[in-house]
Image: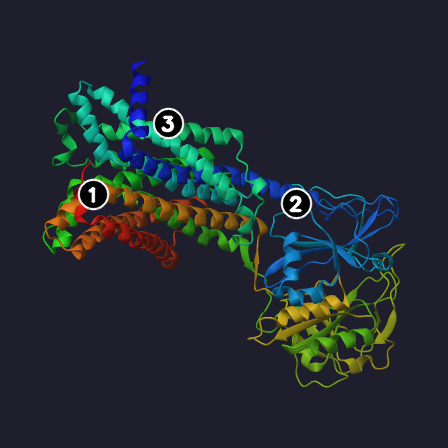
Amino acid sequence: MSLYRDLALGARFALSGGREGWTRTLLTAVGVGLGVALLLGTTALPGALNARHARDNARNDYGSSVQTGATADTLLIGRAESTYQGEDIRGRLLQPEGDRPPLPPGLSAIPAPGTMVASPALRDLLASPEGKLLRERIPYKISATIADQGLMGPRELAYYAGSDTLKQRKAAVSQGDVLRITGFVDRQQEKLDPVLALLIVIIFVVLLMPVGVFIAAAVRFGGDRRDQRLAALRLAGADRRMTRWIAAGEALAGALVGLVLGTLFFVVGRQYAGDVSIAGLNVFPSDLDPTPLLAAGVAVAVPASAVAVTLFAMRSVVVEPLGVVRTSVPRKRRMWWRALPPLGGLALLAPMMGRGRDHGTFNQIQVIGGTVLLLIGVTALLPWLVEAVVRRLGGGPVGWQLAVRRMQLTSGSAARTVNGIAVAVAGAIALQMLFGAVEGDYVKSSGEDTSRAQLTVPLADSTPAQQSREVQTLKDTEGVTQTVVLGYVDAGDRPKNLTNYTPVTVGSCADLRETATLPACADGDVFNAVGGEFGHETPAKPGSTLYLDPTNGGPGQPKGAEIPWTVPAGIKNVQTRPDPMGTARNGLLLTPGALAHTPKVPTRSSVYVSTAPGDSLAKERVLNVAAAADPLTTARALSSVQTSARFAGVRRGLYIGAAAVLMLIGASLLVSMLEQLRERRKLLSSLVAFGTRRTTLSWSVLWQTALPVALGLGLAAVVGLGLGSVLLRMVGRSVTVDWVPAVSMVGIGAGVVALVTALSLPPLWRLMRPDGLRTE
């Protein structure tokens, strides 16, 4: 009972200690509350991502096609995917075939032809001046809005438009872009790659460790004033054990108020979650709902940590009736036990070195434990390092001497201020090394050459005259500088049920040079392309007969044109080259003159479009032209890289977490520095009253910040490089360091501290007034 009485007494001191007590408790609560808000957000993030995935699955139409004919419950659906200004647009055209079609989630009815149901973000974009070009591509009248359950996030651009032409398009069996469905299919979640799983675990540890460090630092705000009060209690008859538990009770009260503030910060911040997009990812506020078990864990862990940290800190403080021993010259910190956490972390991670992705998943408990111990090593070693360095520092300018003397007396406080930023930087360096090493497995070259063309526009299966008009429209589009038109058709050795086929590419001499290295060329020439990756290497023999667009399918498959064509005698062999999409084809290359005496051949054509470098809207105009010719066009911009969707999702999650931690770092550092300035108010006022210049005191405060930050970032770089090297060996990679990202992480950490220090200067100048000596 005495234990609870002492805790309650400490809580009373924290909550009813007058203005001084309330200020101290409020600063502690704000620091703890910021950490609690981020912890609650982190515990809610997995659920939010799962909710996004569940909504995406509920509307999935991939793999849902049925082969039956039209019935009362079938729906024709066409995909009209697009992009606008770098943002993806999910579009679907719908045509019911009966009176009971399946409804996509978020819709109350199938839109009528010519109308659409749009997402709120798309509706707002189309109504804004920025959406002028997009209105030409999506000309449907908005009749309703997609409800939240039909969208992945509040900022998603999506629409469902009614159509009355999909039935005719579906009847042309060669069109595979129209599906007949009776419902939407839930996709199976693919198994997570071991390396990606390791990345996710490391991300959570690296992002949450600074939060824990900041909370531990926040509960120690006002330590000097607290110890003076405890000395008065000792004079009144309290023993040493009682003073320690009273101090724990004060920290517990601040932590509990911090829990309330943190919950309030989280609830208020959650309302604005839908307005924020990071790396293209956004969530509904309702998705950010922490699971009860994890929320309860935060509610228990934070107060318990506050009590534990305070009792641990009090072990080196002897509170006596006439003062606090800590105010004398402190004894040297011991090094040996501070090296144990990083050594223990290495011992946990070392057995997993060389596993790679071929030996199953990594032991998550081992990974978490080892990483946490290595990062804890930063917090353990930094106070010793700061003390060891400042003890050897000597004379200099007055501001430097004031800073050095202050750090020599309270080096622990100086280290605590930068512990969080040091842990964050160490984890960021290790994570950057791991990301850089495995990125090549998930971000690969697509083979597409964006220097030769910027877009590809497939032309619909229409007549040659229609294709010619579409090509001319593309050429006349503002911002288009060049077009390459290539037609494709198959050729077989027989008109039906062929045994061998030869790919045929049709284009002008200039266009064919994009697919092969040609000698002199004139209209009417024919070439044999060899050395490619696709198609048969066997050249067509002069004088042999091939059948263009042969029939090669079973019952119900479309009949080809089966046009006989004789290989001319003057055919030449040429070396193929990749086209702008990176495809190197073997087969025949024909100029239009080679087919002059042949009936019109049904070719599948693609147009590669180059745009003016300075015209940012040229791509949008090209996509508008393509959509006007075919609403279900698969026209798109070329990209030189191809990124795994799972890896991109992990990277987006890292960006979100890093942004949140950076904000926490800045806010917590500012609160910590304000608390330290408040503690030194009378000292600063005394120095000013005795004639010390304000610039001297300002430099003193800056040096007190800069020196621990420099030491902390240096230690963070060493630990981060060590942890990164271990992680690289775990995934089976050689240890290489990309110094640019590593230095950038250190620079970002230093920049955050510099910004916070600049923000703390105005309060510092206000405190440098003689009236700060006034005591009530």
Q: Which mark is residue 304?
A: 3
In the structure shown, which secondary structural element does the residue marked by tag 1 occupy?
Answer: loop
Residue type marked 2 = Asp
Give the residue pinned by disc 1: 680
Q: Nearer the viewer, residue 533 or 446?
A: 446
Residue 541 higher or lower than 124, as above or below: below
Cα separation, mark 3 vs mark 2, equals: 39 Å
Q: Which mark is residue 430?
A: none
Give the residue pinned by disc 2: 148
Cα separation, mark 1 vs mark 3, equals: 29 Å
The reply to whether the C-beta atoms of the residues labelled 2 and 1 are less than 8 Å apart is no
Q: Residues within 10 Å of mark 2 (few under 14, many from 20)?
A: some
Sequence order check, earlier mark of 3 and 2: 2
Total number of numbered labels?
Answer: 3
In the image, is 149 to the left or to the right of 193? right
Residue positioned 75% across, 55% down in the render: 116
Q: Residues within 10 Å of mark 3 (few under 14, many from 20)?
A: some
In the structure shown, which secondary structural element does the residue marked by tag 2 occupy?
Answer: helix
Residue positioned 19% across, 55% down in the render: 699
Q: Nearer the viewer, residue 524 or 255?
A: 255
- Observer able to see residue 532: no
Residue 458 higher or lower than 390, as above or below: below
Task: Pinpoint residue 490: horizontal percent, then vertical percent.
Answer: 79, 67
